[in-house]
Amino acid sequence: MIATIINAVLVLLGSCLGLLFKNRISARFSSGLTAALGLCVLGIGITNMTSTNDTLCVILCMVVGTLLGEAIDIEGRMDGIGELLRRRLAGGGSNSRFVEGFVNASVLFCVGAMAINGAMEAGMNQNYDIIISKGVIDGVTSITFAAAMGMGVVCSVLPLLVYQGGLTLIFGLVGQGIPPETITEMSAVGGTIIVGISLNMLGLPKEKLRVGNMLPAIFLPLLYLPLARWLAGLGG
C-alpha cells in the first residue's frame, strides 16, 4: 500500500499546485514534462520486459492476450465506463464542475494498464517503481486538471486509494501461491505493455496503441508455463 499512498500524496500535491497557480500553467510546461516522464516509463518497461527467462512465453502471451483483448474490446469498454460515469455524475447543477473534475480525474488515475501493472508488481514483487512513476505522472496531470476543474480533482485520491490499493492487496495475497518463475514472466509481459504506454505518452505511433486490450496477456503465463512443462514431459 505504501506505493499507492505515495501516488495519492503526489496527486494531492499536484492538485494543490494547480489550484494555487490556476491559469498560469502553460501547455509547453505540460508537454515537456509529459515527454520526460514518457522516457522514464520507457526505461521501466524495458527493464521489466528484459527480465524474462522465456522470450517465447512473452511473445505468445502478448499475441494471444492481445487477440483476446481486441475480441472483448477491453479498452473500448473502459472508455465506455468512463463516459457513462461522466454523463451520470457530471450533469447539470451548481456542483457540476466539482463533480466533473472528480469523475474525470478518478477515471484517468484508476482506469488503465499502468494501475494494474503497478499493483501487480507492488503486490507480488514488492517493486514500487511502476506505481511511483505513475504517481509522478498523475501528480503532473493533476496540476493541469485542478487548474481547470477545481477541488473535485483533490477528492479523486479516495477512489485511487480504494481501487489501486485494493488491487495491490489482492495481488499480494494471490501472488504467494504463484511460482516465482511465473511471476517473472508476468512481470516481463507487463513490462512490454508498459513500453506501449510510454510510446503513447511520447506520441510516437500515428494511431494510439490500445494498450488496454493487451491486459489479458499479463495473466497468460499462468497457463503457458504449466502447459510448456507438460508438453516437455510428453516429449521426454
Image: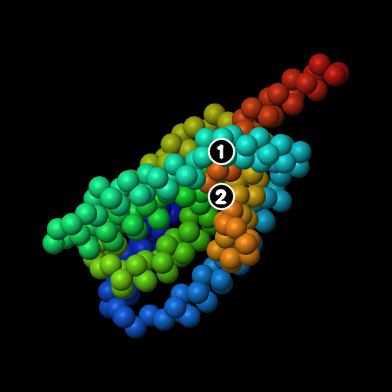
Residue 1 in view: no
Q: Residue at x 40, y 59 (%)?
A: 6
Q: Residue at x 55, y 63 (%)?
A: 201
Q: Quadrant of residue 21?
A: bottom left
- Identify the disc placed on residue 181: none
Q: What is the x, y in percent for residue 46?
A: 67, 56
Instruction: Please tell me in which quadrant of the rendered image residue 149 appears.
Output: bottom left
For numbered disc 1, what is the local secondary structure? helix
Query: Looking at the image, which residue sits at the far right?
Result: 236
- In this rendering, is residue 163 above or below 200? above
N-term-proximal mark, 2 vs 1 = 1
In x, y percent, where is residue 55?
76, 42
Do we see residue 89 in this rendering? yes
If the image is split into quadrants, where does the C terminus sit? top right
Task: Note whether 135 is above or below 115 in the view shown.
Answer: below
Q: What secondary structure is marked by label 2?
A: loop
Which amino acid lies under the numbered mark 2 shown in the image of this protein? Arg
Would residue 119 be found to the left or right of residue 58 on screen?
left
- Residue 8: horizontal and vertical position, in percent? 36, 58
Q: Which mark is residue 210?
A: 2
Most foreground residue, 181 or 189: 189
Q: Extreme top residue here?
A: 234
In front of the other: 138 or 170:
138
Expressed as whole percent of the image width and height from the top left, the position of residue 143 reads 36, 71
Callout 2–callout 1 Cβ contact below 8 Å: yes
Which quadrant holds residue 69? Answer: top right
Disc 1 crowd rating (10 Å Cα; few below 14, some 14-19, many 20+) is many
Q: Which residue is mark 1?
A: 69
Can you name the residue that lies furthest to the left here? 94
- Give the tally of numbered discs: 2
Amino acid carrying label 1: it is Gly
